[in-house]
Amino acid sequence: MRLERPREWGACWLALEMWNFLGLDNFWSKHLTPSRKGTNWLNVLKTLVTYRWISAGSEWRLHRQWFKSSAMADLLGEDDSIALDDTLYRCLDLLHAPKKDLFSFLSERWKTLFNISYDVLLYDLTSTYFEADSKDNERLKKFGYSRDKRSDCVQVVIALIVTKEGFPVAYEVMPGNTQDRTTLPGFLKKIETVYGKLNRLWIMDRGIPTEESLKKMREHNADYLVGTPRGKLSKLEKQLLKEPWKKVQENVKVKLIREEKELYILTFSNGRRDKERRLSTFLCLEQLAKY
């Protein structure tokens, strides 16, 4: 007895069950029709999504390694042709056009299946850089502030909005030289168009909104929770010292100060304090190790 070509079956099967549970066939069957050569783009996409869920990596790795060790061909009734590298890349090109419709579809499904609400939204930005010299997408690939400390590489900026449960609501890929502060107004308008304006709290990093952006949000009665610049905190220091701490959770306490239409919240977390101490100790030891 010998074992030949073992394949991962259970995780692949479960991923396809999740696909069916979300009803994604209902959406993508309208947007991905088979090619003239008979390529079943729907099955190619299922392969890409399953790979992303189980063992995220490059399309090249999917083509060269992962597909052969998975049971996707058996589960989908396909052969290795759906995992050719060119086929995978071409499928990705087909996904951009229905992006807006996809988010609308998913938002309704999540609301139905998981009772997701859109009253609290978190907005943040990140960037990803490219080491290749390709001339493709020169409109997006620009030099800019690199969160990866790779100022020698071109990059793109990615903006993402998620619900408090972590479900994505919208994303946008922008030129790599986009400044964080310029991205907010467009996203606010986009979300309000889809989900309405009322009863929503926006949570953002302090580097994203400008004071002008916050002023416009106040004028439109939009609520927000954003980190306060240190300069402003210094001005509030004396007031904060006078206020008593209020326990809101185990190991979490806050102080509140209201100033005009703004409510300032100073938060103290034992868990966060311990994390900062561990990080500080690690950095000190790392520096000592260099000597």
Image: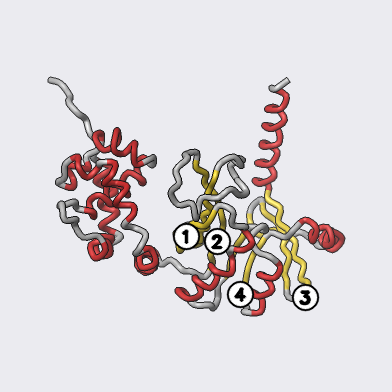
Residue marked by disc 3: 260
* Amino acid marked by disc 4: Ala
Q: Which residue is drawn at 33% across and 52% down?
A: 92
Helix, strand or loop at label 1? It is strand
Residue that lies at the very extreme toward the right in this rendered image: 238
Helix, strand or loop at label 3? It is loop
Q: Name the mark nearer the viewer: 1 or 3.
A: 1
Q: How far apart are marks 1 and 3 (CA)?
A: 34 Å
Which numbered disc flags the more N-terminal residue, 1 or 3?
A: 1
Q: How far apart are marks 4 and 1 (CA)?
A: 21 Å
Which mark, by number, is residue 31?
none
Q: How far apart are marks 4 and 3 (CA)?
A: 16 Å
* Amino acid marked by disc 1: Tyr
Judge the density around disc 3: few (<14), some (14-19), many (≥20) Cα neighbours within 10 Å. few
Camera-side residue: 102 or 176?
176
Residue marked by disc 4: 222
